């Protein structure tokens, strides 16, 4: 009771501290109206100081020296002269030998629990001690009861042999290839396939059953629909389960905000070879990922440090190798917090057009898919159909063919899978693609039968598949996806296009070509939660503990063998000492 009264604030002092502030607010209009001071001086006047509310008292630290003392007496001595109450289970028996210095009540209970297995539960100021026997505990897991599968595939194929009438549209076909006919004998020159499967409840159930087992009544029951896991085991095993579920929750609940910009740069005449990313830095590592061997940044396991710049731009870049990307594909880690500097740099190389600017949040190790475009149906198979001769009354017989239509996607697709570690580094699996599908009519000469016109779907694809590792807040730039567009226009006098001679003499023909480069910018930003600041709170608590260690503390000494044991020296200086013999109340 003395400690509680000493930490409370008298009512009279509290009113004395707050009354000047209240009177100042009440008299402020009168003082300002009667004052001749300028407005600047009144505005610059210091505001009244508001005192913080009194905080709850912190647990004091003490030394615990126990030598073969009764377990019940040790626990009762821990709460002596404190504000806590202790309730002991009848099966709590035995003796303890402990030497702890500079610990709090909670730290002492945790130390005894870790060694002797006596579990405890704190409910406000009430502490209950349990014996080391089998216990049942319920754990809540807030996660979707679902299975999620993702697949990302990029392949370059070349077919041999006769074509079949079946076909399909896939956004992973090579740039400038037709997707209407499927080769019977197909050779894959390059392929990258990534598959991910998420079934968290099954993984948790298997892991916990492996940790707990089934011996001596131990069991694990999971209820994904209710989000509850029931575990029966020893106290130390239950603590391991709690630690595992806590670590799993921290990892699963991490989120990242993904901001992406898919740009198309129409290159000027001086940059027909592509965007010159080497302007951003002076280190020799700047360049195409496939162009130089011995990249000093390729083996960096701690992420991608930003390179210095001397071009006056508020931007720095690092080259990073892109696994699975073809020759000429470039990857950069841009040490900038916004897209403005990158867009300004790209505008120096040509006209920039923003094709898409998606923004999505994704959880840790979960695939996020963005799709902007349209699906259009194209003819992919024609079966049957004939024209037969008939008699004079019926005429010819016509059988219509069976036409198969397949949807082809035209637009922008982006799938990203993030992985966030404890240090704020983000590993991204990135698969962007820009697809344009049009109809091309192919004419096949069948000899005596005639010519057969086959409408095909022509796909023009720019895509890449890569894995990068960057710090939080940096921008990933993927470039080198170039394509050429040619346009032909003809003009002349009326009637000049009848033949080649007149069109040449009295007409004009213009052929233009444009080279474009597709650039993908992705900026991942970790969404902070309350648990992310626990490290800072732990550091602050450790600093306070170091200060408390320098203060005086009480000593609890219990000796169950006083007639045979040597006296245990107590540390000095001492503020309060409690000595008890085993068996005494």
Image: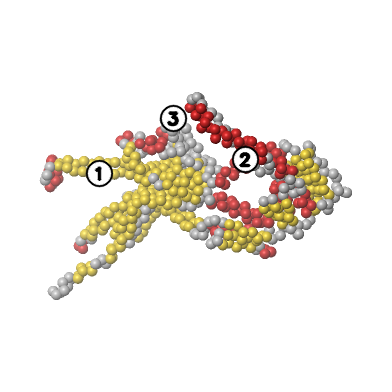
Q: Nearer the viewer, residue 75 or 405?
A: 75
Residue drawn at (88%, 49%) of the image: 563
In this view, 504 is above or below 33: below
Q: Is residue 447 left or right of residue 494?
A: right
Q: In this rendering, which labeled residue sits more in front, label 2 or label 1?
A: 2
How many callouts does the rendering have? Answer: 3
Q: Is residue 579 visible?
A: yes
In the picture of the structure, the residue carrying the numbered disc 2 is 53
| The N terminus, quarter of image | top right
In the picture of the structure, the residue carrying the numbered disc 3 is 310
In the picture of the structure, the residue carrying the numbered disc 1 is 487
Q: Are marks 3 and 1 in contact (CB under 8 Å)?
A: no
> Residue 108 placed where, x, y %?
72, 48
In this view, 443 is above or below 328: below
Q: Mark 3: few, some, or many residues within 10 Å (few <14, many ≥20)?
A: few
Q: Is residue 460 left or right of residue 453?
A: right
Residue drawn at (57%, 47%) of the image: 531
User: Of callouts 2 and 1, which one flags the residue occurring earlier in the amino acid sequence?
Assistant: 2
Q: Residue furthest left?
A: 495
> Residue 204 placed where, x, y %?
57, 58
> Residue 309 placed where, x, y %?
45, 32
User: Of callouts 3 and 1, which one flags the residue occurring earlier in the amino acid sequence?
Assistant: 3
Residue drawn at (76%, 48%) of the image: 80
Q: Quadrant of residue 236?
A: bottom right
Inter-mark Cα distance, 3 to 2 = 53 Å
Inter-mark Cα distance, 3 to 1 = 40 Å
> Residue 400 placed where, x, y %?
24, 67
């Amino acid at each position: 009771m003395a400690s509680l009264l000493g930490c409370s604030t008298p009512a009279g002092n509290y009113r004395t501290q707050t009354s000047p502030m209240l009177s100042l607010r009440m008299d402020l209009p009168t003082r300002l109206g009667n004052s001749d001071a300028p407005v600047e001086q009144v505005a610059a006047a210091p505001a009244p100081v508001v005192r913080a509310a009194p905080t709850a008292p912190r647990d004091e630290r003490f030394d615990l020296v126990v030598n073969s003392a009764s377990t019940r007496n040790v626990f009762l001595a821990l709460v002596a002269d404190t504000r806590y109450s202790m309730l002991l289970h009848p099966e709590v028996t035995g003796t303890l030998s402990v030497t702890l210095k500079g610990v709090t009540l909670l730290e002492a209970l945790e130390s005894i629990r870790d060694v002797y297995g006596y579990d405890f539960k704190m409910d406000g100021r009430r502490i209950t001690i349990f014996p080391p026997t089998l216990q049942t505990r319920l754990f809540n897991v807030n996660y979707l009861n679902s299975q999620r599968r993702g697949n990302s595939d990029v392949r370059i194929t070349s077919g041999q042999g006769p074509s079949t009438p079946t076909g399909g549209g896939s956004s992973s076909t090579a740039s400038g290839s037709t997707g209407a006919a499927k080769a019977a004998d197909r050779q894959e020159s390059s392929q990258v396939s990534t598959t991910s499967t998420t079934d968290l409840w099954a993984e948790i159930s298997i892991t916990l059953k492996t940790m707990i087992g089934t011996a001596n009544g131990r069991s694990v029951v999971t209820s994904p629909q209710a989000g509850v896991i029931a575990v029966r085991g020893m106290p130390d095993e239950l603590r391991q389960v709690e630690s595992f579920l806590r670590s799993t929750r921290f990892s699963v609940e991490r989120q990242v905000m993904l901001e992406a910009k898919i740009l198309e740069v129409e290159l000027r005449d001086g940059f027909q070879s592509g965007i010159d990313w080497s302007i951003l830095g002076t280190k020799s590592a700047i360049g195409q990922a496939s162009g130089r061997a011995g990249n000093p940044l390729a083996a960096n396991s701690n992420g991608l440090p930003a390179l210095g710049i001397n071009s006056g731009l508020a931007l720095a870049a690092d080259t990073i190798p892109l696994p699975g990307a073809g020759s000429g594909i470039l990857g950069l880690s841009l040490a900038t917090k916004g897209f403005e500097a990158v867009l300004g740099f790209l505008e120096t190389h040509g006209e920039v057009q923003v094709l898409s600017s998606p923004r999505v949040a994704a959880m840790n190790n979960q695939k996020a898919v963005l799709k902007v475009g349209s699906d259009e149906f194209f003819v992919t198979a024609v079966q049957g159909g004939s024209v037969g001769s008939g008699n004079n009354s019926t005429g010819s017989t016509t059988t219509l063919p069976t036409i198969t239509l397949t949807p082809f996607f035209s637009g922008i697709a982006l799938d990203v899978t993030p992985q966030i570690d404890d240090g704020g580094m983000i590993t991204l699996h990135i698969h962007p693609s820009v697809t344009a599908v049009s109809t091309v009519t192919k004419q096949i000469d069948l000899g005596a039968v005639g010519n057969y016109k086959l409408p095909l779907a022509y796909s023009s694809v720019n895509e890449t598949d890569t894995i990068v590792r960057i710090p939080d807040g940096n921008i990933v730039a993927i470039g080198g996806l170039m394509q050429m567009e040619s346009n032909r226009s003809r003009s002349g006098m009326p009637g000049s296009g009848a033949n080649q001679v007149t069109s040449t003499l009295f007409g004009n023909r213009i052929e233009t070509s444009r080279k474009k480069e597709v650039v993908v910018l992705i900026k991942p930003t970790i969404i902070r939660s309350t648990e992310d600041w626990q490290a800072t709170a732990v550091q602050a608590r450790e600093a306070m503990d170091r200060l408390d260690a320098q203060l005086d503390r009480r000593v609890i000494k219990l000796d169950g063998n006083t007639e045979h044991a040597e006296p245990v020296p107590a540390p000095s200086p001492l503020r309060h000492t409690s000595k008890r013999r085993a068996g005494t109340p």
